[in-house]
Amino acid sequence: MEEPALARRYYLVSDLHMGGDGQLQHCDYTTEFVGFLKDLAKEGPDTELLIVGDTFGFWELTLVHGLDKLDHIIRAHNVIFDQLRITGANITVTMMVGNHDYDLACDPGFASKLRAYNIHLDTSLHLIRTLGDRKIWIEHGQQRDEFNTFREYGNLYALPVGYFITETFVSGASRHSDFGTGAWLKDIRSVGTMQIPDWILSNYFYREMSTALRWFLLPFLLLSGVTILAIVGEGLRLFGIFDYNILFQNPLMSRLGIIDNVLQVVIAINSAFLVLFGLPMAVVSHDLMRTLRRFRVLTSRGVTQDLDSVEPYLKGAEEVFKRDDKVAVFVFGHTHDAFLKHLGSAGRVVLNTGTWLKLLHRVRVRFGLLPAVYYPSYRLNYFLIEEEGEKLVIRYVTIPKVPEPELTWLERLLTLGREPNPPEVIPARTVID
C-alpha cells in the first residue's frame, strides 16, 4: 500500500503489546512512551509514526470480546491514548496489524474507534513508504512465521497455531500470576518461545519451591560435578588403575575432618541417584533424540522449526529486494529482537524494530546442575528514516530504562561475575548511498 500522505521523516516502533488478562494489563513503559510521543508532537505534518504491528495483546485478552477488547485496553492505558490523540493532530500516526492484534483486520469498527485518537489503521500485510526514488518495505512479519501466519487473512475464525498457544499459556499464566511468589508469570511474553519450559523450571526452583526443599536439594545439585569425578575415581579404583579413590583419599581432603565426612555422604547419595536414575534416563533420552531425528522433528542442530529464527525474514527480504530494486530498507518486527543488518549489495538494509516489553536473558549458573537464571532488561527504541541530501539515513535511538530489582540473592550469587550476552550493537546512524 502506498503512503496516505507525503512524509519526509518516518519513525518506526513495534510490539508494544498493550493489554491482556490479569497482570498483562500492566504497562512498564508508559512514562517513556508518552515522553516519546510528546517529542513527536513537536514535529510537523511531514512526519509519520508507524507502529509496526502487535500494538495490542488481543490474543492474551480472553475476558472481553469483540470491539470491547479495544475499549478495555484504552481504559487501562488512557494516558498513552490521550497523548496519541494530541500527537496525531500534528503528525500522521499509522498502525499496522500484527498477529496478536489480528482482530483489527477483521472488524472495521476498530478503525473508527482508533480514528477518534487520530490513529490511522492500515490492515495491509505490508506498506510501502518512499524517500526520493527509494522505497521502504514495512511489515509486521507474522506472514513469514509458520506458527502465526494467517491462511485466510481477514477471517476472524481462521486462526493459526500460535493463537491457541498464546491463549492457553500466555493468558493462562497471567490469570494465575497473582497466586505466585511475585508476579513473575506475567513476564512469559518476555521469554523466547523455545526457552519457556526452562524459564518456568528456573522460577519454580528459585521462587515457588518450598524453602526447606530448596535448601535440602542445593548441596546435592551444587556438588553434581564433583559427584561425577567421584564416580570416575571409584571406577579407576575398581579397575585397579589406582589403589584408592583419589578424590577423597588425599592429604587435602583428610584435613577437612567432619566436612570431608559430610561431603562423602552427600556425594555417595548423589552417586547412587546418578547410577540408578541418571544413566537409564541418559540412555532413554539418547534413543528419544534418535527417534525424533528420524521423524525429522529434530536435526543435528536442534529443533527443525526454530520459532525464534531470523532466517525466514532475511530470506523474505532477499525476495523483496530482488523483486523491486527500488526497495532499500526492509522493516519488520514480530521477533522482539532489534537489529540492523546490511544484506547483499551495498544500499540494502534489513532492520527489526524490537519491542518495548521487558526482555529476559538466560544466564547459566557457575557450577552444579542448578537451573539457569533469567536476567531482566529493557531495550526501548525507535528507528527514524529520513533523507539527507541524496542519501538515506537511518537513525537508531534507545530510551534508557532500568528494570526493578527482581532477582533473588541466591540467583545473583550463583551467577556472580556472569552477565547476559550484550545485545547486538546497532549503529546510531546508518547511511545508505
Image (spheres, helix red, strand yellow):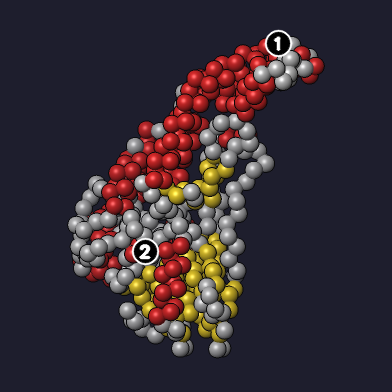
Which of 361 and 346 lies nearest the eye of the viewer?
346
In the depicted view, which residue is nearer to us: 3 or 264?
264
Residue located beneath label 2 in the image = 144
Is residue 32 in sight in this rendering?
no
Classed neighbour count for the residue bearing mark 1: other residues with Cα under 10 Å, few (<14), some (14–19), many (≥20): few
Q: Amino acid at mark 1?
A: Ile
Which one is in front in this view, the residue at disc 1 or the one at disc 2?
2
Image height of 288 relative to 41, above or below: above
Three-letter amino acid code at the position of disc 2: Arg
Q: Which mark is residue 258?
A: 1
Counting residues from the N terminus, which is met first, the one under dot 1 or under dot 2?
2
> Is 203 drawn above or below residue 242 in the view shown?
below
Q: Is residue 354 above or below residue 260?
A: below
For residue 404, the mark is: none
SS of the residue at dot 1?
Answer: helix
Q: Quadrant of the N terminus?
A: bottom left
For the point 60% across and 16% down, the residue is: 268
Q: Is disc 2 placed on a helix, strand or loop? A: helix
Where residue 307 sits: x, y (%)?
A: 41, 53
Quadrant, the C terminus: bottom right
Residue at left 41%, top 76%? 320
In this figure, what is the number of numbered marks? 2
Is the Cβ of the residue at disc 1 closer than 8 Å to that at disc 2? Answer: no
Name the residue rendered at 40%, 80% in the picture: 323
Q: Is residue 104 left or right of residue 187?
A: left
